[in-house]
Image (cartoon, rainbow, N blue to C red):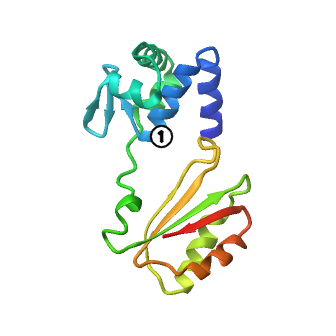
Amino acid sequence: MMIKMWERINEKFKKYPARIRVAEKMIELGLSINENGKIYCGNLKISDKALATAAEVDRRAIKSTIEVIKEDPELNNLFSNIIPAGTLLKNIAKNLELGVIEIEVGSESEGILAATTNLISKKGIGIRQAYAEDTELQKTPLLTIITEKPVQGDLINEFLKIKGVTRVSIY
């Protein structure tokens, strides 16, 4: 479904790279469009200027992207139903005495989440949060796992044995 939708977005905006960046940024940030064409993150209205700055485009690209989305039933359905994923604890994990594992994923990503969580649970460590970047959206997607306590660095070699894992950082 996601690949088909990206093909649809690329097809619709292929002549307009700025519009593609707007659509990508909206999906990345969990931004939706309401029935009036206004941009929201949850119930917080986002200004065109703020999105333009984040997507590194001119504000006019925001308006034109929204117009095209509103005119296309498939895209309108997608962008009307996006909800933000919530808070990622990564940047505040240290303050909360939690552990962070970042795993860079190669093109072969199937089963990495299951294998890594299995390895962590075998060490008796609870998982608070797992966040996987979309392999279609990111050039080098990351799987971020927040654990109940910091994980020992000696697990890096175990993580690197998992098919598709290209790099591991533990902090």
Badge 1 density bin: few <14, some 14–19, many ≥20, Cα 10 Å: some
Q: Is residue 107 left or right of residue 137?
A: right
Residue 90, image x, y percentages: 41, 61
Location of residue 39 with respect to 127 vertically, above or below: above
Residue 150, image x, y percentages: 44, 77
Question: What is the number of callouts on the image?
Answer: 1
Location of residue 74 with respect to 106 vertically, above or below: above
Q: Quadrant of residue 149?
A: bottom left
Dot 1: what SS?
helix
Q: Amino acid at mark 1?
A: Glu
Residue 79, image x, y percentages: 44, 31
Location of residue 46 with respect to 60 vertically, above or below: below
Does residue 34 show up?
Answer: no
- The residue depicted at 63 percent of the width and 25 percent of the height is 10
- The residue depicted at 34 percent of the width and 22 percent of the height is 49
- The residue depicted at 73 percent of the width and 56 percent of the height is 108
Q: Quadrant of residue 4?
A: top right
Q: Quadrant of residue 109?
A: bottom right
Location of residue 146 with respect to 82 vertically, above or below: below
The residue nearer to you, when weighing 127 against 91, is 91
Q: Is residue 84 left or right of residue 104?
A: left
Query: Furthest residue to the left?
Result: 44
Does residue 72 show up?
Answer: yes
Residue 29, image x, y percentages: 42, 40
Write down the residue under mark 1: 28
The residue nearer to you, when weighing 74 against 68, is 68
- The residue depicted at 60 percent of the width and 19 percent of the height is 12
Quarter in which the N terminus is drawn: top right
The residue nearer to you, when weighing 158 against 81, is 158
